[in-house]
Amino acid sequence: MNRNIREVPIIFLGLGNIGGTLLRQILETRATVAERTGLRLVPIAVADVSGLLYAADGLPETTLSAALEATRGGGTLAALPGLRPLSALPSVLRPGAILADLTASPKTVPTLHAALNAGCGVVLANKIPLAGPWAEAAPLMTHPYLRYEVTVGAGLPVIETEHYLRDTGDCITLIEGCVSGTLGYLCAELERGVPYSQAVAQARALGYTEPDPRDDLSGKDVARKALILARTAGWSLEEQQLAVEPLYDKTLASLSVEAFMTAASTLDEGYVARVAEAQGQGKVLRYVARVTPEGGTVGLTAVERDGPLGALRGPGNYIALYTTRYQPLPLALSGPGAGREVTAAGVLGDILKLARQMAM
């Protein structure tokens, strides 16, 4: 049994699907993690848009349980006793703590910098801070106490693999893959002959898309992931160096969500034709990101039916890293690219690795 247990204070930004799942995983596995790693993870603060709960020695489990219950189904911490204003967050930052950004907000960037400047570590599930202009993303991506594994591929260790390749002197030359479970589902349904509008409606009903499906169909989320992969490979690409194909006509961009869902049927015929064209070539359609040091493309692509991309079904992700050593066959990672349990577990893994690193 490990008798030298070190406490690691944890600060949560966001208690949505990933944040809530991560908090439950920490509470449920705390004894096992402490025994195996010598680290006891202690949630000291939980914050959302409504405010902040904080206790310097660790929030009581009754408070954490109440926070989980309050935020279930999209609720906030607003009604909980002891809630402090969100402006108090900088005062709880302290050396050795680890802040986990579990939001999807561009507004957390100042807090991330404040945390790093205060001697905290930072773990990101939030892609947005790393996908903006390179001059703003670089100080975060290159900071030794910031980890971001789950920003691409959920629990797949693709970021760690890229670091391993570069650390051992290899050079990544091409990155290719499918990194959206939502669009993977859509492509699989189109392949089955389901009309585009019906496939989008099904994905929305199943909770695979954002409330406005265009947030997924725009390709922007895939483009962010492609930028993160490219920048991790050492290429300081900007968003405008990626050609991104949205999966809806620009004339539908200004419609309300419900109006878009109705108008989506006008796109059915076009996607039937694209599926048929690919099938006529013995291929299938997949939403593929392909990036090199010079730039890249993100969009619907006809790929070989029997190839690794063609074999993907549903929310599966596949990422191929071509390097000076791994070619013509790439180093490839494949597995679930979505899911709150595997994503939260990936954040937990980053927290543990960062806690060990910061103690060295």
Image: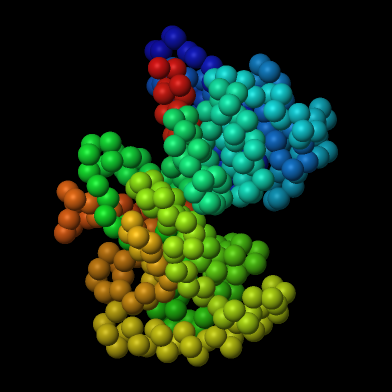
Disc tally is 0
Q: Position of residue 86 (x, y in %)?
A: 76, 35
Q: Residue furthest front?
A: 135
Q: Position of residue 4 (x, y in %)?
A: 44, 9
- Residue 140 visible in this rendered orientation of the protein: yes
Identify whether 287 is placed above or below 3.
Answer: below
- Residue 182 visible in this rendered orientation of the protein: no
Identify whether 11 is placed above or below 294.
Answer: above
Residue located at (26% from left, 74% from top): 304
Residue located at (37% from left, 88% from top): 276
The way the protein has been coloured in the rendering is: rainbow
Q: Viewer-proximal residue, 77 or 353? A: 353
Q: Quadrant of residue 41?
A: top right
Residue located at (33% from left, 56% from top): 293
Q: Viewer-proximal residue, 231 or 76? A: 231
Q: Quadrant of the C terminus?
A: top left
Q: Position of residue 210 (x, y in %)?
A: 61, 62
Residue located at (55% from left, 45% from top): 136
Q: Quadrant of residue 303?
A: bottom left
Q: Quadrant of residue 241?
A: bottom left
Q: Is residue 217 left or right of residue 179?
A: right
Q: Quadrant of the N terminus?
A: top left
Q: Position of residue 128 (x, y in %)?
A: 56, 50
Identify whether 58 is placed above or below 104.
Answer: above
